[in-house]
Amino acid sequence: MPRRKSKRMRTHGGSIYQLKVTLKDSKPPIWRRFLVREDTDLSCLHEILQDVMGWTGSHLYEFEVGGTLYTDLEDYDDYSIAPTMEAQSVTLRKLGLREGDKFRYVYDFGDYWVHDVVVEDVVPEQEGQSFPVCLKGRRACPPEDCGGIFGYFDLLTVINDPDHEDHVEMIEWLGDEFDPDAFDVEETNALLRSK
């Protein structure tokens, strides 16, 4: 599924949200801390989360905020139960999120990557700042289509055991460059700036 390019607001003034996203059940935790404007809608936040986490945008997604589900409804044609709200229709400001609030982001309904998102802070925007921006993070994003978090744990076991019968096949599938401990904040911010 091609990624949509939504407009990332560039106006000044208003509030900035500091968010921390953590991939649920990841041990040790896979997480990112980043800043976005209050006028960021949830469709745009999805794209930002894809970039900061390292996903490819190939699958459906949804947010659950205060018991309400949000997504790009046009992508739900084949589903009998659609989320109740269009993701582009609501911004962080409209949701009334405050420091300490939490919500859920799910990516890929097959592998079912669940992310916990926490509002760590809400501060006034300072002139001259550029958003979105990633501040920090830990560990690499799992490869797409590896079977969810528990499939990822199995994959790590296989690639860390040269004697495992599937070791060579998994290394070939991943490529020699995959490092589960790697995260590059500068590379992530270059990706965010390129949109």
Image (cartoon, grey):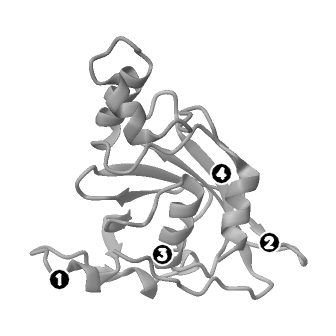
Q: Which image quarter: residue 3?
A: bottom left
Tell me whether circle 4 and circle 3 mark residues in contact (CB < 8 Å): no
Which of marks 4 and 2 precedes in the sequence?
4
Tell me residue 31's x, y (percent). Answer: 57, 43
Real-space CA distance between mark 2 and mark 3, rounded to the nearest whole angstrom:
20 Å
* Residue type marked 1: Asp
- Horizontal arrangement in the rendering, residue 39 relative to residue 58 (left or right): right
Q: Callout 1 environment at 10 Å: few (<14), some (14 to 19), or many (20+)?
A: few
Residue at the image point whose x is 85% and y is 72% from the top = 129
- Which of the two marks, 1 or 3, is nearer to us in this view? 1
Residue 33 badge: 4
**Could you tell me which secondary element the residue under label 1 belongs to?**
loop
Task: Identify whether 181 is placed above or below 112.
Answer: above
Which residue lies under the disc numbered 3? 42
Real-space CA distance between mark 2 and mark 1, rounded to the nearest whole angstrom:
39 Å
Q: Callout 4 environment at 10 Å: few (<14), some (14 to 19), or many (20+)?
A: many
Residue 77 badge: 1
- Which of the two marks, 2 or 1, is nearer to us in this view? 1
Residue at the image point whose x is 53% and y is 39% from the top = 30
- Horizontal arrangement in the rendering, residue 60 relative to residue 126 (left or right): left
